[in-house]
Amino acid sequence: MTDPKMLAARFPGDFVFGVATAAFQIEGASKADGRKPSIWDAFCNMPGRVYGRHNGDVACDHYNRLEEDLDLIQSLGVEAYRFSIAWPRIIPEGTGPINEKGLDFYDRLVDGLKARNIKAFATLYHWDLPLMLAGDGGWTARQTAYAFQRYAKTTIARIGDRLDAVATFNEPWCSVWLSHLYGIHAPGERNMDAALNALHFTNLAHGLGVSAVRSERPDLPVGIVLNAHQIYPGSDTAADVAAAQRAFDFNNGVFFGPIFKGEYPESFMTALGGRMPAIEPGDMETIAQPLDWWGLNYYTPMRVHDDPAPGAEFPATLPAAPVADIKTDIGWEVYAPALGDLVRKLNADYHLPECYITENGACYNMSVEEGVVDDQPRLDYIAEHLSVTADLISEGYPMRGYFAWSLMDNFEWAEGYKMRFGIVHVDYETQVRTVKKSGEWYARLAGEFPAGNHASSAKG
């Protein structure tokens, strides 16, 4: 179903349609106005870490093109913008002096959103840890959680009065496992013990961040954004089914368990608990404070087989083959039903607050031809996943909004600039923005909202 009016009719009139970005991926200006390096600036400078040694020095030059980019968001007719705040702009060394010029930029950003009647959804941490903190151990050190608490308090004290919602972290799975165990993201560690430290101290930082937000703005809805994985066994053998459960505990349970139940999964603790850092009295209570909302980032399912090798480390799984034959240009399986299966499973396992799909989208690398970007596969992907979201709402799940990833093509982390997720094309040589076919379609859909009811949804 790709007719935007027919699709819109399946959503409540107050459903929020938005677009999302992250600071390091779009801002550029990496040395401007007091900003100091993050772990990603360092990672980009190490040969063999990022495709083509691409970096975030310029990116989409959003820092210098803020007003025109806010106009672009407004032109898409969306109701909300999800962005992240760069810790190295606010407290450039992670601890120590506060950089007023960094706060000024986000002041201008949120004021610009308010002036355009666009809701502001901020994320405090989207992976750009101040590099100076890496010298003290980064996320493997407990004190980083307290540095984050101060950064959160500082930021919310300044702009929290104009935010509509705030998330502490974006995808801790990436900044823990992908960054400290698999070595694919900064700081590029490949060490289970480092990853286990990063896991607990990230969870602790989340809890301390929630407290910091509430101490400054008790009425500001606070949550966290998790890239939960829908995990399917590669076969119906008992070994593969058990492997899928272990993978669920390892990839999802280590975040959802502490946050929503106040405990790490039993299977995980049995296997790896002896290698965890000290969990001090009060830690789990801090982590498990009730949240106002949570964000789900979903792109593709995970499929696993049991790893029968003797001594295979928990979760002891191997990748299984995809079921769908459609893949995006980054190689990810397209399988929309997994989104529904995932939301149902998570709500069955945990007592969850209302949910926003904070990222969903597809990598397709079409270029501009005669002023047009025909990215029909991306349009189809978004429509298909929105259809699943509408099904979930009809089943009674509290899905409150959807943010397309991404507003514009940008720095795709280890993939550099070769992978494009935007609904707006960016020519990195000229910085010209071109709304893609998917972006024009999404604007028509968003234009139907907010609507009082769909009997009279002729707005826009």
Image (cartoon, rainbow, N blue to C red):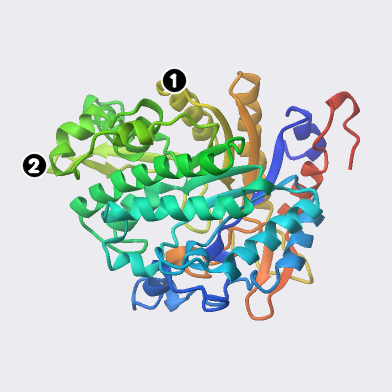
- Which residue is rendered at x = 28% and y = 32% of the image? 264
Asked whether the residues under the numbered discs 1 and 2 touch, taking CB atoms below 8 Å apart as contact, a structural biologist would say no
Number of the front mark, 1 or 2: 1
Q: Residue at x 71, y 42 (%)?
A: 17
Q: Nearer the viewer, residue 33 or 70?
A: 33
Please identify the quarter of the rendering in which residue 263 is found. top left
Question: The C terminus is located in which quarter?
Answer: top right
Residue 72 visible in this rendered orientation of the protein: yes
User: Which of the two residues, 169 or 21, is positioned nearer the viewer here?
Assistant: 169
| Closer to the camera in the image, 199 or 296 | 199
Q: Residue at the location (63% across, 61% down)?
A: 106
Residue 308 in which image quadrant: top left
414 left or right of 280 in image? right
Dot 2 alpha-carbon crowd within 10 angstroms: few under 14, some 14 to 19, many 20 or more: few
| Dot 1 amino acid type | Ala
* Relative vertical location of residue 273 with respect to residue 182 in this rendering, above or below: above
Q: Nearer the viewer, residue 323 or 143?
A: 143
Residue 42 is situated, as x and y percent measured from the top left of the image, at 38, 74
Would you say 382 lies left or right of 200 here?
A: right
Find the distance from the CA under tag 1 to the CA under tag 2: 33 Å
- Mark 1 sits on what residue? 348
* Residue 350 x, y percent position in the rendering: 42, 24
Residue 234 seen in the figure: no
Instruction: Residue 310: give its label.
Output: 2
Q: Secondary structure at mark 2?
A: loop
Q: Could you say where residue 11 lies in the image, as x and y percent from the top left? A: 73, 29
